[in-house]
């Protein structure tokens, strides 16, 4: 059932963590539970990987037992095997042995390890679509609308991240496409970064883009430093989103083991990292004691400035915020209106609008627009036209990019009928601006 899909993905995430810890039986059990709840291709592929690792481990254990001459020798060698990255080494060593025996030589095992990753035409099409986008066209990369909700951004990222997973998608450029998808999700899932991007249309992490790279701290702790990093890697983002390690599970900042996942030419790999941060108790014991007044002085100063800033507002009534509005009808925004300037259609909440001072102003003026309504509708028109300008520019850039791809460098062999067809393609946002008289 579709309702069990979230629980199935959680079980798959738990199976991932058990596999990272080297507990293959528990990983297999949770993976099978995920398939029982909701069958997904990811769980099926992951179960095959676990079965191969269990079979490879059993083969390696049998070889060790035969060499030792008894089951006790096998038990001893198994107990001394785990290391900081035992799961990964066991999988790599056993896979190399199996490939070597199948081909009759060590060279055959190396060739099998370097076999080109497979991919489907659909996966290649996804990579091609993303690579044709500019690196800062985050909405186009995730294929979501500009006014979409955060849950739609997460849903689009989940779908693309699983499709571009390096363990499944071996198409050329898949790694770069995965990084572009991760960067787009980083920006659009953060309200501050998304607002800065919507305003300036550039990467909010870059200098001069209208937002400091220091504005977000939680996912970007610097490794080995006291500050913050402006970005996190696509691997860390995938691990945090799907529960495969990093900050979300298997470790943390307390000094225990931390399991993370990384992607590369060889596919999906896990690492076991032990982090030990020095405690600060010793430094605090050596600190010189200060008087209570000196310790509380910054708080007194902050309280004084806060009181002075709030003093004027104590003797004046706070301004009433403008009503909420939407450009599409919904159960919440159920009353349709048109602006007095450009005649733009918008919707407001009937209960909220009727109790707003704007409605009282309309009643006093016999439904004639007053200053408050004009100021509010100017805001509506500014938001609407600014979004149209952004979409128009994006559409024009897309057409220009397609034309350049078709013409090439010298225009040899160019299909000029296709170029003219691209030129004739309409851009609805630009046409709407022309209809409003804002674009020639």
Image: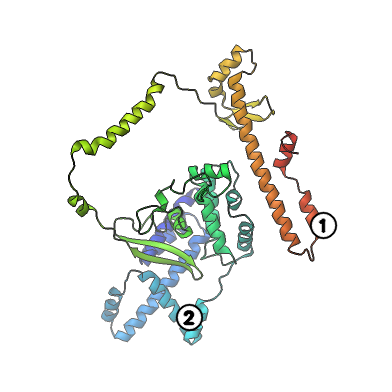
Q: Residue at x 57, y 60 (%)?
A: 177
Q: SS of the residue at dot 1?
A: helix
- Residue placed furthest toward the bottom: 104
Q: Position of residue 100 (x, y in %)?
A: 47, 83
Q: What colouring style does the render use?
A: rainbow
Mark 1 is surrounded, within 10 Å at the Cα level, by few (under 14), some (14 to 19) or many (20 or more) other residues, namely few
Residue at image coords 60%, 62%:
123
Rendered view: 326 above or below 195: above
| Image: 304 above or below 124 | above
**Residue corresponding to mark 2:** 99
Answer left or right for 260 relative to 323: left
Q: Locate residue 329 relative to residue 3 in the image: left or right.
A: right
Q: Nearer the viewer, residue 352 or 51?
A: 352
Q: x and y percent of residue 194 in the render?
A: 52, 44
Tell me which corner region of the image, top left, top right, bottom left or bottom right, holds residue 290.
top left
Most extreme residue toward the right, as rendered?
Answer: 417
Choose the circle earlier in sequence order: 1 or 2.
Answer: 2
* Residue at x 68% of width, y 50% of height: 397
Residue at 41% from the left image edge and 73% from the top image edge: 91
Left or right? Give the position of 347 relative to 244. right
Image quarter (top left, top right, bottom left or bottom right) of the C terminus: top right
Q: Is residue 160 above or below residue 60?
A: above
Neighbour tally class for label 2: few under 14, some 14-19, many 20 plus, Cα within 10 Å: some
What number is the disc on residue 417? 1
């Amino acid at each position: 059932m579709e309702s069990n899909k979230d629980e199935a993905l959680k079980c798959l995430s738990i199976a991932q963590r058990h596999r990272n810890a080297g507990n293959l039986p528990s990983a297999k059990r949770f993976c099978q539970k995920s398939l029982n709840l909701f069958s997904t291709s990811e769980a099926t592929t992951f179960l095959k990987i676990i079965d191969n690792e269990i079979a490879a481990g059993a083969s390696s254990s049998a070889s060790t037992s035969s060499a030792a001459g008894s089951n006790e020798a096998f038990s001893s060698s198994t107990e001394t095997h785990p290391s900081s990255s035992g799961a990964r080494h066991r999988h790599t060593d056993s896979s190399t042995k199996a490939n070597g025996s199948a081909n009759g030589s060590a060279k055959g095992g190396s060739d099998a390890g370097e076999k080109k990753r497979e991919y489907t035409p659909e996966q290649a099409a996804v990579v091609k679509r993303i690579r044709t986008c500019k690196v800062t066209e985050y909405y186009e990369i995730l294929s979501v609308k500009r006014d979409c909700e955060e849950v739609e951004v997460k849903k689009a990222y989940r779908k693309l991240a699983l499709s571009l997973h390096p363990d499944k998608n071996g198409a050329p450029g898949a790694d770069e496409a995965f990084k572009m998808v991760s960067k787009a999700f980083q920006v659009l899932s953060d309200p501050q970064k998304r607002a800065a991007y919507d305003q300036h249309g550039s990467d909010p992490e870059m200098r001069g883009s209208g937002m400091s790279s220091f504005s977000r701290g939680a996912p970007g702790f610097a490794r080995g430093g006291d500050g913050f990093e402006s970005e996190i890697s696509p691997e860390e983002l995938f691990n945090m989103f799907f529960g495969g390690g990093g900050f979300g599970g298997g470790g943390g900042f307390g000094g225990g083991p931390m399991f993370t996942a990384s992607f590369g030419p060889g596919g999906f790999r896990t690492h076991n990292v032990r982090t030990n941060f020095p405690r600060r108790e010793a430094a605090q014991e050596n600190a010189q004691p200060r008087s209570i007044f000196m310790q509380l002085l910054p708080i007194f100063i902050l309280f004084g400035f806060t009181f002075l800033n709030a003093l004027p507002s104590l003797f004046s009534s706070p301004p009433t915020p403008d009503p909420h509005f939407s450009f599409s009808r919904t159960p919440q925004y159920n009353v349709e209106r048109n602006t007095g300037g450009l005649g733009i259609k918008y919707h407001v909440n009937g209960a909220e609008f009727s109790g707003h001072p704007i409605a009282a102003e309309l009643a006093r003026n016999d439904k004639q627009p007053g200053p408050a309504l004009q100021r509010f509708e100017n805001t509506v028109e500014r938001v609407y036209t600014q979004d149209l300008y952004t979409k128009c520019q994006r559409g024009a850039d897309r057409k220009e990019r397609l034309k350049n791809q078709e013409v090439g460098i010298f225009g040899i062999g160019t299909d000029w009928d296709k170029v003219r067809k691209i030129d004739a393609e309409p851009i609805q946002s630009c046409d709407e601006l022309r209809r409003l008289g804002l674009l020639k």
